[in-house]
Image (tube, helix red, strand yellow):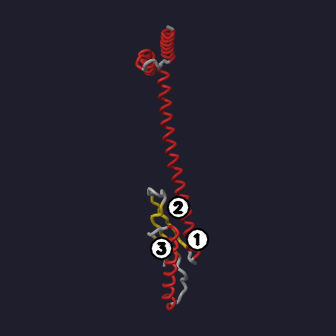
Amino acid sequence: MDKLYDWMRDLIVCFCMLELFCHLVRTDEYRRYIRFFGGLIVLLLALEPAGDLFLAGQTFEEALRRAFVREEAYELRVSQEALADLQNEQIEEAYRSELERQMREIAKANGRQCISVDVRLSKSEGNPAAISSVLIRLMPLNSNLNVFEKETDGARQQAGVDRIRAEIASVYGVEDIQISVKE
């Protein structure tokens, strides 16, 4: 019985507030909007007891609160997945940068200077960040050679490139290694 009195009181208060707002607004155009939206609120209040019947004993507020909680939980799960993806991307980028740094060190240890190193990663079942290919551009050994030294220099450069390729292949287990020398 108290629910019935509360419902009737809310309905009467809503009607009174609606009439008060209509009298405060002087323009008929705005009164139309106030009556329309006020009518929607009165309709919701009038249907509240019927909504309680359909919700099997739950009050409308409880059902609404639960719907909001479910929505927030869903948004939290989506945010968590997005953060996990972002974290994985950051870890992958840091791993790629470290591999590129190590390959520069291998080239430097073989007496060569790198212009660029590009490591491409692929995802496989056993290894989520396997190295699929490596692209390295090296500086030439010495550009101030005379005509007779260029022929032996080419063989020396190729031997250095082969040593770098072999070391990267043995350390990282990569088959697709492309190394070019800037001319």
Q: Residues within 10 Å of mark 1 (few under 14, many from 20)?
A: some
Q: Read off the residue under disc 2.
A: 96
Q: Is residue 136 above or below residue 80?
A: below
Q: Read off the residue under disc 3.
A: 179
Disc 3 to disc 2, C-alpha distance: 18 Å
Q: Is residue 77 above or below residue 183?
A: above
Looking at the image, which is closer to me, 76 or 171? 171
Q: Position of residue 142 (x, y in %)?
A: 55, 82
Disc 2 to disc 1, C-alpha distance: 14 Å
Q: Is residue 80 above or below residue 183?
A: above
The answer to whether any part of residue 19 appears in the image is no
* Residue type for callout 2: Arg
* Residue type for callout 1: Glu
Looking at the image, which is closer to me, 166 or 70? 166
Q: Position of residue 67 (x, y in %)?
A: 47, 28
Residue in the picture at 50% in, 49% down: 85
Give the number of the disc on residue 105.
1
Disc 1 to disc 3, C-alpha distance: 15 Å
Q: Position of residue 48 (x, y in %)?
A: 44, 17
The answer to whether any part of residue 148 appears in the image is yes
Lower position in the chain sequence, tag 3 or tag 2:
2
Residue that extends furthest to the bottom in the rendered view of this protein: 148
Residue in the picture at 51% in, 67% down: 172
Lower position in the chain sequence, tag 1 or tag 3:
1
